[in-house]
Image: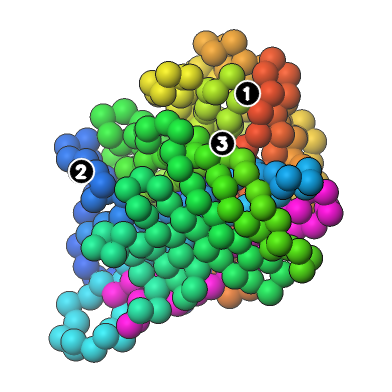
């Protein structure tokens, strides 16, 4: 979300596979990074890769429930090029939009892959906008308006933060494995009020609900012995939130690298170390675990995570890697909604 990672995401490898390796010396993620907002909500072209992830659960006035995803990826391919052409390849942009129609038991998605060209795709602090074709997120202060149009659905949604954004990790760094290098700068809006319209099945639905927003930027994400991750966004009915993630290793006998964040009802966040929670898969649909047990003793949480639909897999159509990302329910010691992202189950990721 992790997101989704994303929120954090795997399919940026589609761009990596289509483009040549870049020679530009991209920055490393370091604890001396000086955050500056609102500037840091937008592009970081001195880092190789970044993504903006939006996921949420909404209801119509008639009781129809939807899950939605809109994600933008940027992958840098900067060279010491002499050409000044507007089409000179400096960045590749991938975008995914998805809709889960819970009542109709239908999952739909679309993807776009573009190079940065004159107005084709980009991210701009000056314009307060991230876009790929006519899919976009436009910022007005911290209010963010999402627009996406696909053959089977479209949506226009306004997202307003109910809590301040949080910076994940420790000392401004979200570590992904032991040692230096595999890390990101990772910022989330953990609870955003959603209002707007979703069109599905030829019907326009006024909707309202909650969303989660992730933004990560980095130059190296995973260690060589890691294959993929399981990322959870959790929005509970007591107005607390959690982000939990585990990065799995090639050797299943080795423990995954895990970390998380707990956000209290007052908006204060704290980092969760691997010893503070446990993620246990319970049931699968194909290769993907779609039911989990989540235990966070320090927060007095023992939750069941269950996908609202078993098949919410985004199967790559433009050379990328398929992954599962979809709406989930939480029950047990508390109730809530959220999103689950699972990558690397069909093939090993390289980020």
Marks 2 and 1, how far apart in space?
32 Å
The main secondary structure of the magenta stretch is strand
Q: Which residues are magenta?
A: 90-118
SS assignment at label 3:
strand
Q: Quadrant of the C terminus?
A: bottom left
Residue at x 23% of width, y 89% of height: 85
Question: Which of the labelled discs sits on residue 36, or is there none?
Answer: 2
Q: Is residue 95 magenta?
A: yes
Question: Does residue 120 appear in the picture of this structure?
Answer: yes
Pointer 1: what residue? 237
* Figure colour scheme: rainbow
**Of the two numbered discs 2 and 3 in the rendering, the one whose residue sits closer to the viewer:** 2
Pointer 3: what residue? 233
Residue at x 37% of width, y 32% of height: 164
Q: Please state if 105 lies on the left or on the right of 128 as rendered.
A: right
Observer-nearest residue: 336 or 141?
141
Going from the N terminus, do you reach mark 2 or mark 3 first? Answer: 2
């Amino acid at each position: 979300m992790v997101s989704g990672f994303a929120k954090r995401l795997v399919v940026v490898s589609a761009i990596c596979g289509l483009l040549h390796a870049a020679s530009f010396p991209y920055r490393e993620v370091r604890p001396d990074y000086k955050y500056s907002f609102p500037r840091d909500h937008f592009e970081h072209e001195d880092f190789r890769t970044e993504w903006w992830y939006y996921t949420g659960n909404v209801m119509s006035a008639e009781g129809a429930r939807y899950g939605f995803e809109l994600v933008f990826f940027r992958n840098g391919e900067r060279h010491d090029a002499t050409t000044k052409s507007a089409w000179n390849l400096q960045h590749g942009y991938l975008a995914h939009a998805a809709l889960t129609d819970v009542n109709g038991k239908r999952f739909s998605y679309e993807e776009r892959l573009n190079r940065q060209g004159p107005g084709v795709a980009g991210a701009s602090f000056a314009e307060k906008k991230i876009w790929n074709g006519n899919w976009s997120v436009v910022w007005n202060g911290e209010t963010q308006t999402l627009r996406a149009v696909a053959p089977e659905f479209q949506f226009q949604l306004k997202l307003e933060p109910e809590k301040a954004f949080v910076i994940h990790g420790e000392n401004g760094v979200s570590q992904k494995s032991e040692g230096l290098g595999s890390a990101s700068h990772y910022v989330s809006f953990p609870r955003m009020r959603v209002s707007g319209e979703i069109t599905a099945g030829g019907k326009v639905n006024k909707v309202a609900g909650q969303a989660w927003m992730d933004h990560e930027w980095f130059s190296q994400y995973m260690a060589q012995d890691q294959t993929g991750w399981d990322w959870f966004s959790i929005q509970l009915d007591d107005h607390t939130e959690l982000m939990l993630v585990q990065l799995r290793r090639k050797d299943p006998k080795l423990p995954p690298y895990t970390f998380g964040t707990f956000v209290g009802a007052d908006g204060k966040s704290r980092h969760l170390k691997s010893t503070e929670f446990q993620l246990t898969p319970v049931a699968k649909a194909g290769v993907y675990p779609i039911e989990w047990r989540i235990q966070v003793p320090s927060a007095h949480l023992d939750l069941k995570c269950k996908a609202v639909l078993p098949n919410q897999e985004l199967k790559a159509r433009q050379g990328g890697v398929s992954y599962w990302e979809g709406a989930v329910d939480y029950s047990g010691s508390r109730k809530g909604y959220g999103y689950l992202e699972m990558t690397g189950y069909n093939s090993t990721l390289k980020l």
